[in-house]
Amino acid sequence: METVLLVILILIGLATFFKKNNNSVENGNSEELTKKISELEKSLSAKEENIKSLQKEKEILKAKLDSFEKIKTEKTQIEERLKLVEHERNNLKNKNTSLLKEEEGRNETLRKSIESTNTLQQSLKDEKERLNDERVREAKERLEKMKLKWGEHERNIENHIKLICKNHVIKYINQENFPHSRNKPDNSIEIMDQLIVFDAKSPANDDLSNFPKYIKLQTESLKKYAKHEDVKKDLFLVIPSNTLHVINQFTYNIGDYNVYIITKDALEPIILSLKKIEEYEFADKLSPEERDNICRIIGKFAHTTKRRIQIDQFFADEFLDTLSKAGSQLPREILESVIQFENAEKLNPPMEKRKKQILTTDLKEKSDQIQKETQMRDIPQIDAQIKFKGENESEK
């Protein structure tokens, strides 16, 4: 482009030069020169047209160059965005890989947790079945022991009454020697020419719901003994101590005679209370007040004995229930430790010696000593009120 412009300028200069020196040129050369100038002008016009064309092409090329630069810039921007997208894609890919690994780890942990849970559930199920089987076995053994105790009840009562009679020089009368041949009770003793009947009764099976009704019927059937003149009108039915919780009445006034429901533990104090009457040589001369006092003492003995048996039975059931809960609810390690401590313990209650009398004064002194210790240690007095089903107001 610059060379073309230089040529044009030279031609313009030459044309100007020839016009200024037109007078000095010969006439022969004037026409030729004019012709050349005309050709030069035509050539110049062509060059100018060419220059204009070249300028247009330049502008077009410049526009294309600008467009190319714009495209190049856009390309660079696209490449940058592509790099960012690629980088983001790689990050997402890495994150996805990490998440997949975490998911696999969680799945593995969950699988192990499920296996552990299943194992624990199976273990708990087995332990529950074992405890249930153990409870069923213990209940069965307890029932068998109760049945065995009931089966031996009559023989145990007979042996116990014989032992009491032997220790306190009381005449025991067995069934064979009972004077009335048609009706013979299980056991009877003779005090002041009177026969005192002790009939042993026990449940027929493990269903105790009908036992109170059975006892009531038996009280009415004792009339066959009470109708004899030499039989004392106070008769006793001896029941197993583990049936007390179903009995709601312990005294029956039938009219011509009275029936008392007692247990084996009440036999000795009742028999001794009855024997106490022998100390009165002229019992038929006793005043009504003295007779009432004797009856009151006997009644007090009977009531106190029954209440003590009721309380012992109540706490025995509570202790058995607590022991059962301890065996089923305590953790195994603690239970094993408890059993070890239990095996290491030993209780030594006072030993009873034959012919050694238990003095009331000694018992009272011991009671006073305990009461003084509770007062010295500021231990509050507790009034226990244990109520039993079916207790009437007179027994509270």
Image (cartoon, rainbow, N blue to C red):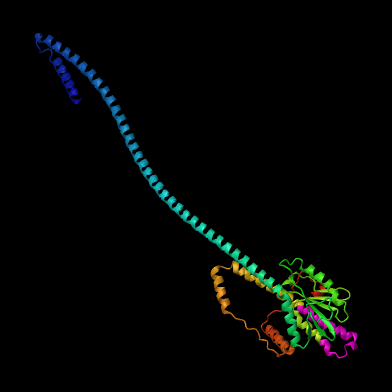
For image coordinates 77% across by 83% down, the residue present is 269
- 43 versus 179 height, above or below: above
- 328 versus 190 height, above or below: above
- 270 versus 57 height, above or below: below
Q: Residue 224: which quarter of the image?
A: bottom right
Tell me if residue 383 can be seen.
no
Residue 236 lies left or right of residue 287; in this view the side is left
Tell me if residue 78 can be seen.
yes
Residue 73 lies left or right of residue 126; in this view the side is left
Magenta part, dominant SS: helix
Q: Residue 200: which quarter of the image?
A: bottom right
For image coordinates 74% across by 89% down, the residue present is 361
Q: Where is residue 42 in the image (x, y as percent from the top left)?
A: 19, 14
Q: Nearer the viewer, residue 354 or 12?
A: 354
**On-image quarter of the C terminus:** bottom right
Q: Residue 80: which quarter of the image?
A: top left
Is residue 45 located in the magenta-colored stretch of the structure? no
Q: Which of 5 and 74 is in front in this view?
A: 74
**On-image quarter of the N terminus:** top left
Q: Where is residue 71 in the image (x, y as percent from the top left)?
A: 32, 32
Is residue 281 located in the magenta-colored stretch of the structure? yes
Q: Where is residue 76 in the image (x, y as percent from the top left)?
A: 32, 37
Q: Nearer the viewer, residue 160 or 52?
A: 160
Read off the magenta span: 276-305
Q: Position of residue 207 (x, y in %)?
A: 72, 66
Q: Nearer the viewer, residue 167 or 319?
A: 167
Q: How many labels does the image show?
A: 0
